[in-house]
């Protein structure tokens, strides 16, 4: 049984940067990636704001060296770029030297291709391969193809906005149980009309910059992104004499079974997830130095998560902030995006500011961190709370 789950590599592409370094620079400079829609033809383009990645699909294909007739969805393209960054960052030259798995999270999958070719499906057989790439697992298969994973486990998780956090948790458990030596974990989601229209129907999209934990929050900004982390066992780290970025110290998930889209008013699921993660990590709540909150800037989420944090951290709430004001809510990828941000916080001993905050919520007196703060960090807790009551928490640490 491996005692430590080491993070040895990270990769990311989001609206605030095309790699880890660019993302970190944007975080410490307070640079948001939220803007008006420019790449998707939608009736709502002038009424909502999103976190778009600057590259077109064609530019992403060129980065991966793909031919024009490929059937990679935008989700797959983004995921492949981030996963390859992570593997390179981990210094892996032969992906199949050890028992290596891939666990990729997505909610959108190949929806963008379906939208583009739906009406041509029965008239033009050449476009049918794009519809075949609609399902969530297709993007995972393409990422595995790009990484050259020939054997072992390749699987997909789709538990709404907790998906990537659950991929990290599953990867850690597979290493702990000795089933795998190394797992590439994370998630990818692109923007699509489906998600824009769906969230518009729920009436939780903001027409301005999102304001997590603010009394006057109007809703979320959707975003697109991909991020992956390389998890490795103690044995691999020792055999390869590898530098370790951080450790996955604890994890937990729970479901409050309250509503199809809303979290319970008292944050039951989030409370249980955080408590489970602390138990796995064998840490008291007082040992958490920073909380990277889910913080979507919706009325329900921020109230529910805020109450859950108060329940878990009765002795005093540590510094906390949401980074969704930078990237938007990247859905299934959010847990991986914020995992990378959590590790960067640990490495650089910083707490990121909660952008756009002005007025504390009337239900409680908690105020997020409002300016970049330098602080010695040892443990960071990251929440990912999704539709269907799916709640997950990961704890990252400098030490195993």
Image (cartoon, grey):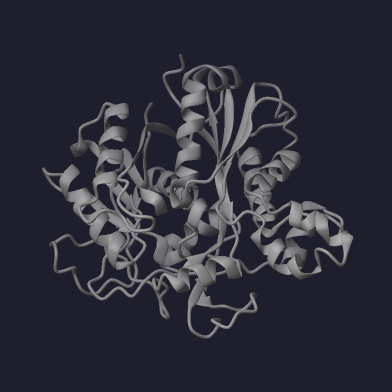
For the question of whether residue 90 can be seen, the reply is: no
Q: Residue furthest top?
A: 1
In the rendered view, tell whether residue 71 sits above or below residue 234: below
Pick the residue in front: 131 or 354: 131
Indicate the quadrant where residue 17 lies. bottom right
In the rendered view, tell whether residue 303 sits above or below residue 377: below
Q: Residue furthest bottom?
A: 46
Image quarter in which the C terminus is found: top left
Residue, x 32% and y 46% (percent of image)?
A: 257
Q: Position of residue 134 (x, y in %)?
A: 69, 54
Residue, x 20% and y 32% (percent of image)?
A: 284
Q: Is residue 265 left or right of residue 277?
A: left
Q: How many marks?
A: 0
For the question of whether residue 254 can be seen, the reply is: yes
Indicate the quadrant where residue 204 lies. bottom left
Pick the residue in front: 113 or 288: 113
Residue, x 58% and y 65% (percent of image)?
A: 191
Q: Position of residue 320 (x, y in %)?
A: 27, 54
Q: Position of residue 112 (x, y in %)?
A: 67, 63
In the rendered view, tell whether residue 171 sits above or below residue 198: above
Q: Position of residue 342 (x, y in %)?
A: 40, 47
Pick the residue in front: 31 or 228: 228
Residue, x 41% and y 62% (percent of image)?
A: 324
Q: Is residue 22 left or right of residue 88?
A: left
């Amino acid at each position: 049984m491996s005692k430590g789950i080491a993070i040895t590599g990270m990769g990311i592409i989001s609206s605030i940067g095309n790699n880890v370094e660019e993302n970190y620079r944007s975080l410490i400079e307070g640079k948001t990636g939220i803007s008006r829609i420019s790449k998707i033809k939608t009736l709502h383009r002038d009424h909502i704001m999103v976190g778009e990645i600057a590259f077109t699909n064609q530019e992403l294909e060129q980065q991966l060296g793909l031919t024009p007739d490929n059937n990679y969805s935008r989700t797959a393209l983004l995921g492949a770029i981030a996963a390859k960054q992570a593997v390179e960052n981990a210094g892996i030259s032969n992906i199949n030297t050890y028992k290596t798995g891939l666990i990729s999270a997505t909610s959108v999958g190949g929806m963008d291709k379906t939208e583009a070719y739906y009406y041509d499906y029965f008239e033009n057989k050449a476009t049918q391969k794009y519809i075949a790439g609609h399902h969530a697992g297709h993007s995972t298969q393409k990422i595995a193809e790009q990484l050259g994973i020939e054997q072992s486990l390749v699987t997909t998780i789709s538990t709404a906005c907790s998906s990537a956090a659950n991929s990290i948790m599953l990867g850690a458990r597979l290493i702990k149980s000795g089933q795998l030596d190394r797992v590439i974990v994370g998630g990818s989601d692109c923007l699509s009309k489906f998600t824009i229209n769906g969230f518009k129907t729920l009436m939780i999209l903001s027409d301005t910059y999102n304001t997590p934990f603010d009394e006057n929050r109007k809703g979320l900004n959707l975003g697109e992104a991909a991020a992956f982390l390389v998890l490795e066992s103690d044995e691999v780290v020792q055999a390869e004499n590898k530098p370790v970025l951080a450790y996955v110290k604890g994890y937990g998930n729970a479901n409050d079974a309250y509503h199809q889209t809303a979290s319970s008013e008292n944050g039951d699921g989030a409370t249980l997830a955080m408590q489970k993660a602390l138990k796995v990590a064998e840490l008291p709540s007082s040992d958490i130095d920073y909380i990277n909150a889910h913080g979507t800037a919706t009325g329900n989420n921020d109230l529910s998560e805020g109450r859950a944090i108060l329940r878990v951290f009765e002795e005093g709430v540590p510094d906390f902030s949401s980074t969704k004001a930078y990237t938007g809510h990247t859905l299934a990828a959010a847990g991986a995006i914020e995992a990378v941000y959590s590790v960067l916080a640990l490495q650089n001993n910083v707490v990121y500011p909660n952008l756009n905050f002005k007025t504390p919520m009337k239900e409680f007196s908690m105020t997020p961190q409002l300016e970049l703060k330098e602080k010695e960090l040892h443990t960071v807790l990251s929440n990912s709370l999704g539709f269907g009551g799916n709640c997950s928490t990961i704890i990252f640490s400098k030490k195993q």
